[in-house]
Amino acid sequence: MVIKERQSIRGTWVIYLLLMTELPLLVLMTVLWLTGHFGEDGHWEYLMIVGIMAGIFWLLMSMELQTRINGHSIAYRCFPFTGWRTYPKERITNIKVIDKGVMWKFGGIGIRYNFKKWAYVFSDEAAIEVKADGKSIVLSTRMPGKVKKMIEEWKTI
């Protein structure tokens, strides 16, 4: 059995919050630029602010957590920040599924680090906590039932 999962921030409250703050700011900046309140060279400031806002929006829209779990390993990547990282079953010392309140335990949606573990939280439904090689990572999942079955398969093999 192979579990493949893709999660993104698109469609979450984070994107709506971003749009509700960026769009009024963009309208205000456009009005100020068109009325001449930025001065003669104001178009450069306007373009810089619009470019920064577009870059932040693109970054959040392109963030994606991909997880693959098979009978031999667990692999994940958080595009565009990390490449594929694989933990073979032999190196994993502990793995468990956290069922509720993932977002509250790890401080919200996104990538988190608290000096003990890395957390890649893109959903509040459930998460997989993996300890391997002295490191601890948390990967959110929307398929906790399938992951629990895979963990049980690992224990029998």
Image (tube, rainbow, N blue to C red):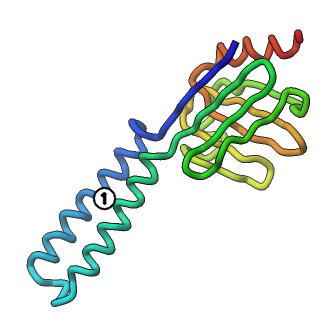
**Image position, residue 27 (x, y; %):** 18, 63
Q: Nearer the viewer, residue 55 or 129?
A: 55
Q: Residue at x 41, y 41 (%)?
A: 13
In the image, is 80 to the left or to the right of 98? left
Please identify the residue farthest to the left as the structure is shown.
35
- Which residue in the protein does label 1 denote? 22
Picture layout, residue 113 above or below residue 11 = below
Q: Nearer the viewer, residue 4 or 19?
A: 4
- Tell me where residue 137 sits by quadrant: top right
Q: Residue at x 81, y 22 (%)?
A: 72
Picture layout, residue 67 above or below residue 113 = above
| Mark 1 residue element | helix
**Image position, residue 9 (x, y; %):** 46, 40
Say what amino acid the circle numbered 1 marks.
Answer: Glu
> Which part of the image, by quadrant, shows the C terminus?
top right
- Tell me where residue 68 sits by quadrant: top right
**Image position, residue 53 (x, y; %):** 35, 63
In the image, is 142 to the left or to the right of 114? left
Badge 1 local density, few (<14 within 10 Å), some, or many (20+)? some
**Image position, residue 58 (x, y; %):** 40, 53
- Tell me where residue 2 sits by quadrant: top right
Picture layout, residue 23 above or below residue 110 = below
Q: Residue at x 75, y 33 (%)?
A: 129
In the image, is 107 to the left or to the right of 57? right
Q: What is the total number of numbered labels drawn onto the structure image?
A: 1
> Which part of the image, by quadrant, shows the N terminus?
top right
Q: Residue at x 66, y 30 (%)?
A: 127
